[in-house]
Image (cartoon, helix red, strand yellow):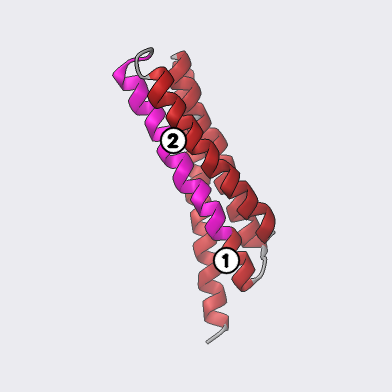
Amino acid sequence: MQRRWMMLGAILTMLSVAIGAFGAHMLKDKIGASAIATYETGVQYHMIHALALLIVGLTAGQLGASTKLKWAARLLFAGIIIFSGSLYVLSISGIKILGAITPIGGVAFIAGWLLFAMDVWQRGKTSL
């Protein structure tokens, strides 16, 4: 589990930098200011949650894999795809219906962080 999520986190972090650079250099003059702001929000959340996957992988290495950590990683990954992905497509295409999909990714982020916190909390209680 540790290697998989750390590798995916590193790849997704690299992609967030590339996608951000693409937006800054290729899209800035082609889409409006509001669309750029939407795109940048996608990049920001993408980066934060890719780093979170690295943290989950490191935690699994330190504390051992668990069902909660596995689901936390899966939900953070799904959140990147759904939340950031929908914002990327929305900002470039202007398809407004994608705005209805974005909150699903946000819920995945919240659930992933909650599972991560629960896992760490429960393990701390058993080691006392």
Instruction: Count neighbours of disc 1 (C-alpha within 10 A) and say few if under 14, some if 14 to 19, many if 20 or more.
Output: some
Q: Position of residue 2 (x, y in %)?
A: 66, 60
The front one of 37 and 25 is 25
Residue 4 placement, left or right of 38: right
| Element carrying mark 1 | helix
Instruction: Count neighbours of disc 2 (C-alpha within 10 A) and say few if under 14, some if 14 to 19, many if 20 or more.
Output: many
Q: Position of residue 127 (x, y in %)?
A: 56, 84
Mark 1–mark 2 distance (CA, rounded to whole Å)? 24 Å
Q: Position of residue 10 (x, y in %)?
A: 57, 48
- Residue appearing at x 55%, y 73% in the figure: 122
Question: Which residue appears farthest toward the left when viewing the image?
Answer: 33
Q: Is residue 128 visible?
A: yes
Q: Amino acid at mark 1?
A: Thr
Q: Position of residue 34 (x, y in %)?
A: 31, 21
Q: The magenta stretch spans which residues? A: 31-56
Label 1: which residue?
A: 59
Q: Is residue 70 above or below residue 127?
A: above
Q: Amino acid at mark 2?
A: Val
Residue 128 placement, left or right of 91: right
Q: Is residue 100 visible?
A: no
| Element carrying mark 2 | helix
Q: Magenta stretch: residue 47 in it?
A: yes
- Residue appearing at x 46%, y 43% in the figure: 47
Label 2: which residue?
A: 43
